[in-house]
Image (cartoon, rainbow, N blue to C red):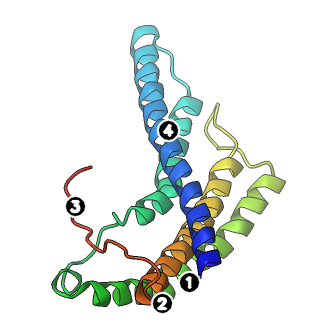
Amino acid sequence: MPALLTVSRLIDAVSQFMGKLSEYMVLLCCLISAANALIRYSFNYSSNGWLEIQWYLFAFIVVLGAAHTLRMNEHVRVDLIYGAVSDKARIWIDVIGLVVFLIPACLFLSWLCWPFFLSSYLQHEVSANAGGLIRWPVKLVLFLGFGLLTLQGLSELIKRIAALTGYILIDTKYEKPLQ
């Protein structure tokens, strides 16, 4: 179990880094949006590339930030049962959710995204818009994002099993005050 917990900490570190990167992408997206609006209204000049890069950044933020959100236990939940049961029952609910839903879904989505990316890359796919961007980077990020979410799901599974076997204590509360 200690070796698996070390792997879990490594995955957590990668997710934390990607979450921090996503935070900076939000700032970058705001700056690009503001600059694009300023240039468009001040100089009557617009570029589809700048609009598309904003959409790419939105995708990067959401997809790359998802693993960090899972690590922080901040994903949206339907609190019909989870809030009313013991910590041990919450851990079991998490284990079942990870094994039955999250990990298989992310593996499947990664599997679907790879040929989608590869085809775009090999065909040098470009946006149909004038001045549009190449498409493969955003498709690669989809693949990487689902892969990272899969790894973070495995990390969370390791931590939940370690908690069930008494190796570690984890906080199962998810409705926390804003950090």
Q: 44 and 83: which one is in front?
A: 83
Mark 1, residues whose alpha carbon is within 10 Å: few (<14), some, or many (≥20)?
A: some
Q: Which residue is mark 2?
A: 100
Q: Position of residue 32 (x, y in %)?
A: 48, 27
Could you tell me if the residues under marks 1 and 2 are in contact, i.e. CB atoms within 8 Å? yes
Q: Secondary structure at mark 3?
A: loop
Mark 3, residues whose alpha carbon is within 10 Å: few (<14), some, or many (≥20)?
A: few
Q: Position of residue 139 (x, y in %)?
A: 65, 56
Q: Which residue is mark 3?
A: 176
Say if 35 sits above or below 8 in the image. Answer: above
Q: Residue at x 59, y 82 (%)?
A: 1
Q: Secondary structure at mark 2?
A: helix
Q: Which residue is mark 4?
A: 25
Q: Secondary structure at mark 4?
A: helix
Q: Position of residue 68 (x, y in %)?
A: 47, 58
Say if 102 sits above or below 60 in the image. Answer: below
- The reply, left or right, for residue 83 in relation to residue 135 is left
Q: Which residue is mark 1?
A: 104
